[in-house]
Structures are given as structure tokens and as C-alpha cells.
Image: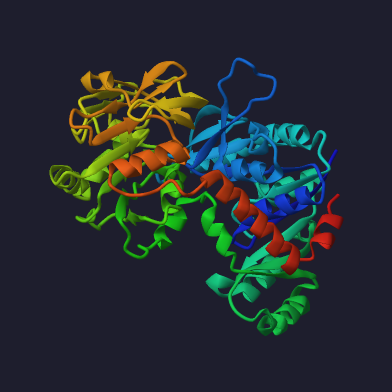
């Protein structure tokens, strides 16, 4: 078995995902064979990963965070790197994916009862990820301080104690109260869990780190834990795909640029990192529009992203008045791209006769594409290579979707995927729909599409930028953390 170390947070969104990715890249640069692992993840940002030993399967789903961490390790992503993935569909329920495959839906209370059975899958995947590795860096979920959930926990101390993995606690100083959050975690953890923690680190510090010396001494007084370092605000993290939609609440418009791209923030928005390559373009401003705000009238392009609940988000789209904004945008000559669930919304209707997504079984679409979608139980999950029909340029991405879309506009496909036509284009050419995530990640296509909108682009090698960002983060961690000590405590 490989040696392992685990990062757990004093709360959600403390930066564990980026820190694990950075430590994975740092370990790789030291010549170690390293793998990421997250027992349980909750996110609608999913990636397609290999299912080892299943040559017939098109692929399985894992969180985009573990996909990114696999890139940091320089290895292909595997479903075993994130054996349990929860994809929220409602405020109280989620689709449950185990080792890449959907096993059903569960309400929050029902899911707690399932956890005992899921631990077997977690430990099975843990053994598979550990094979042939020198080091596995594990990411927790939420916080071990959620002691009300401890009895059935599989994501934090429940896993760490079963697998005997030492834990480094991560505190986020940017949100305030970091001394209390670290000391409070120490106070309320049962002794069995507390002894798994070998130390802590402070993340997202802005300014002179020496000003926190007294804070470190205070935490040591309260806990006896060692500090592995204080990580500054990592600017390069902004160039990495984001995992959780919580970050969308903090995104604001940047400086005015040649093209404004408006993205409505759907309630069950999925795979919104499809927009990251556009955000990286110097001439493009991507604006995420929250509910209650109109789509900006000066946008040249509106992108409707993926959704975990197409009909539900379509109804909310209308409630927000975005349907009127979108029609006005199109009448002004604006362009529209719908990806996956966004593509389905652009048609005349979406039907769900089996109630797969919920109790509402039919909704009128936005009507910008002459197509209709019918939800079907079988889910398409696969990585794909394709070509753009409009520009005859290569595309590369993945599909994760339910439903089949048909209609006259599909006779004008947006892409050809594995020899099969995909998507649809409106008669005026201004509205494009596709099931393929990662559309804008193809540098040549992105440049050609932006040029068709009168904007210069394509000077950014997006994948290379991600690699450079990972290298920069690893270098920062080597400077600001005692990585020798962290890796040395792995067991």
C-alpha cells in the first residue's frame, strides 16, 4: 500500500482542492508516483474518467476536482479517485454515483442511512488507487467538526480512522475566525479523531505573514498541534477550473473588454468550467448573472450552461425573466450557445415522461432552436473527439447527459462526434446547441468562433495555462509550507 496523507478543512470552501492539487504536483516534481483520492464529493461539476477493467464502458463520472488533481499528478483520471459522487438535483435530494455509475437518487436523510454500505465501495477504491503509488493525497469534504454526522461518516474522520491516514487540518483565514475554527475543531473532536491530526496549515493569507506569528502561538497553546505553514492567497488558482458553484456568488464583472459573455447562474448549474477558456481570453469578459438580475443588454454572446435539473432550471429561467432578456438579445443580433442542459432548454419543449428529474414532466422551451428533447433513463457518459461543422476544426471534450434531442435544426449539426452528428444550429446561424462539454477548450475552434463574432482570440493555450498554474502553485507551497514534514508524516 502507498503512504498517504489527508487534508481536511475547518469548513467547506477553505481551499482543500487547490492545496491537494498543488501538493500532488509538488510530489510529482520530486519524482514520486502520486495519486489523488476523495472518498465522497458533492458537486454538479463532473468529469468523465476511466473505469479500469471495463473496456465496454464509455466512462464513469467523478468530480472535476479529482480530474484536475489527476492532471497535477500526471496520470489518467480513474473513477476510483472519487468513488462516491453526489449530484444535487433538489434542495433535499441528489443523484448518487458510486465508482462512476449512477445507483439511484436519495434524499439527504435517506443518504445518511446509505453511508454504511458505501464505505465498502470507498475502501475498495482506496485499495485500487493505492496500488503502484508512492503517495496518495486525500481530500476530505466539508469538515470533521460536523460531529452530528460522525457516526456514518465516510468523507472525513470516518475514512481516516478506517484507513489509518494521518490528517492535516486546513483553516481559511480569509473568511475570518481562523483561530477559533482550528481551536474549536480540536475542542469538539472525540479523542479517536483528534489523534489522527498531525498538524494544521493556514490558507488564503493576504499581506505580511509574520503578522500571524502570535496567531500560530495561540493555536499551539489551545491545541498542541504544529503549524506546517501559512499559504498566501494563490493568484494562480484563478486559472484553474472551479469545483463548486459557491464560487459563482463571488464572481464579479472585470474590466470592459471587446466581447461580453453573459452566463445565467442556474440553480442546478453544472460543469460551468466550460467557460474557463473564454475567461482566459484577454478580449473576453465573462459575466455570471445571478438570479434576480437581468441578462446584460450589451452582451454579445449568451451561454446557457449545463444543468443537473433541466426542467427545474428552465422554469426558474422564466421566473427570472431571462427568457424575455434572451429573446431581446437574439432580436438585437446577439449570439447564443447552449451546452448540454442549456442546449435542451433552447428547444421548443423538454419532456420527462418517466419523471427522471422530478415531478414536473414537461416544460415549454425557450424556442430559439427547432428541436424537442425527451429524457430517457440511460445516461450518456463518455470522453469524445469531434470536429466543428462550421469551422472544420478539431474539438475534444466529454458528454454527461440524459435525453435525446430531435427536430429540424438537428439537420444543421454543430459538431460531428465519433462520426455521428451532434447538436443543432438555428437557420440564422446565431444559436448553437451541443451536448459536448469542453467546446471552448479547443484553442483553434475558440479562436475561429471569436473571430466570427469580430473578436481576436486564440492566443491562449488553455491546457498549457492550467499546467503552468499547477506548477506555480506547487512552487508557492514548497516555499510557504514544510512539504518535507507533510510528506514525511504520510503513512
Q: Is residue 387 above or below residue 169?
A: above
**Vertical position of residue 473 compared to residue 232: above or below:** above
Residue 342: give x, y in percent of width and height: 32, 37
Q: Position of residue 308 (x, y in %)?
A: 40, 37
Side of 11 where 159 appears, left or right: right
On the image, the x and y values in percent for residue 420 come to 41, 16
Query: Residue at image x 25%, y 58%?
Result: 293
Q: How many marks?
A: 0
Instruction: Tell me, yes or no, if residue 96 can be seen here.
Output: yes
The image quarter in which residue 41 lies = top right
Q: Is residue 70 left or right of residue 378?
A: right
Q: Residue at x 55, y 71 (%)?
A: 174
Q: Which one is nearer the viewer's eye here, 69 or 449?
A: 449
Image coloring type: rainbow
Left/right of residue 324 with respect to residue 138 in the rendered view? left
Q: Observer-nearest residue: 186 or 12?
A: 12
Residue displayed at 49% across by 51% down = 244
Q: Residue, x 62% and y 43% (percent of image)?
A: 66
Closest to the observer, 356 or 4: 4
Amino acid at each position: 500500500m502507498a503512504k498517504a496523507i489527508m487534508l481536511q478543512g475547518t469548513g467547506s470552501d477553505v481551499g482543500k482542492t487547490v492545496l491537494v492539487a498543488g501538493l500532488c504536483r509538488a510530489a510529482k516534481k520530486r519524482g514520486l508516483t502520486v495519486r489523488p483520492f476523495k472518498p465522497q464529493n458533492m458537486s454538479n461539476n463532473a468529469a468523465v474518467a476511466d473505469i479500469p477493467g471495463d473496456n465496454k464502458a464509455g466512462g464513469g463520472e467523478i468530480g472535476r476536482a479529482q480530474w484536475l488533481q489527476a492532471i497535477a499528478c500526471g496520470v489518467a483520471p480513474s473513477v476510483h479517485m472519487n468513488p462516491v459522487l453526489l449530484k444535487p438535483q433538489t434542495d433535499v435530494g441528489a443523484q448518487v454515483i458510486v465508482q462512476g455509475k449512477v445507483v439511484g437518487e436519495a434524499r439527504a436523510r435517506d443518504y445518511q442511512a446509505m453511508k454504511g454500505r458505501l464505505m465498502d465501495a470507498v475502501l475498495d477504491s482506496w485499495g485500487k488507487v493505492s496500488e503502484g503509488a508512492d503517495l496518495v493525497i486525500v481530500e476530505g469534504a466539508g469538515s470533521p467538526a460536523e460531529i452530528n454526522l460522525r457516526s456514518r461518516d465516510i468523507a472525513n474522520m470516518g475514512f481516516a480512522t478506517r484507513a489509518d491516514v494521518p490528517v492535516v487540518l486546513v483553516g481559511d483565514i480569509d473568511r475570518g475566525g481562523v483561530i477559533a475554527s482550528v481551536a474549536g475543531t480540536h475542542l469538539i473532536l472525540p479523542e479517536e479523531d483528534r489523534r489522527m491530526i498531525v498538524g494544521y496549515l493556514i490558507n488564503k493569507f493576504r499581506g505580511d505573514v509574520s503578522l500571524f506569528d502570535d496567531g500560530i502561538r495561540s493555536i499551539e497553546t489551545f491545541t498542541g498541534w504544529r503549524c506546517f505553514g501559512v499559504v498566501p492567497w494563490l493568484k494562480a488558482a484563478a486559472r484553474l477550473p472551479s469545483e463548486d458553484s459557491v464560487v459563482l456568488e463571488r464572481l464579479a464583472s472585470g474590466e470592459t473588454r471587446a466581447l461580453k459573455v453573459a452566463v445565467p447562474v442556474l440553480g442546478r448549474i453544472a460543469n460551468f468550467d466550460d467557460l474557463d477558456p473564454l475567461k482566459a481570453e484577454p478580449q473576453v469578459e465573462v459575466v455570471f448573472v445571478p438570479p434576480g438580475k437581468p441578462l446584460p443588454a450589451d452582451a454579445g454572446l449568451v451561454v446557457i450552461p449545463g444543468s443537473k435539473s433541466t426542467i427545474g432550471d428552465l422554469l426558474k429561467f422564466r421566473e427570472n425573466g431571462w427568457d424575455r432578456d434572451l429573446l431581446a438579445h437574439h432580436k438585437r443580433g446577439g449570439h447564443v450557445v447552449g451546452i448540454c442542459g442549456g442546449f435542451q432548454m433552447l428547444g421548443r419543449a423538454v419532456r420527462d415522461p418517466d419523471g427522471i428529474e422530478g415531478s414536473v414532466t414537461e416544460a415549454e422551451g425557450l424556442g430559439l432552436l427547432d428541436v424537442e428533447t425527451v429524457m430517457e433513463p440511460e445516461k450518456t457518459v463518455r470522453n469524445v473527439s469531434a470536429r466543428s461543422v462550421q469551422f472544420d476544426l478539431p474539438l475534444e471534450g466529454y458528454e454527461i447527459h440524459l435525453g435525446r434531442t430531435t427536430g429540424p435544426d438537428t439537420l444543421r449539426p454543430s459538431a460531428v462526434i465519433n462520426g455521428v452528428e451532434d447538436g443543432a444550429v438555428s437557420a440564422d446561424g446565431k444559436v448553437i446547441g451541443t451536448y459536448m462539454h469542453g467546446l471552448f477548450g479547443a484553442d483553434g475552434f475558440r479562436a475561429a468562433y471569436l473571430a466570427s463574432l469580430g473578436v481576436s482570440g486564440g492566443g491562449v493555450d488553455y491546457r498549457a495555462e492550467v499546467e503552468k498554474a499547477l506548477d506555480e502553485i506547487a512552487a508557492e507551497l514548497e516555499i510557504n509550507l514544510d512539504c518535507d514534514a507533510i510528506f514525511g508524516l504520510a503513512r
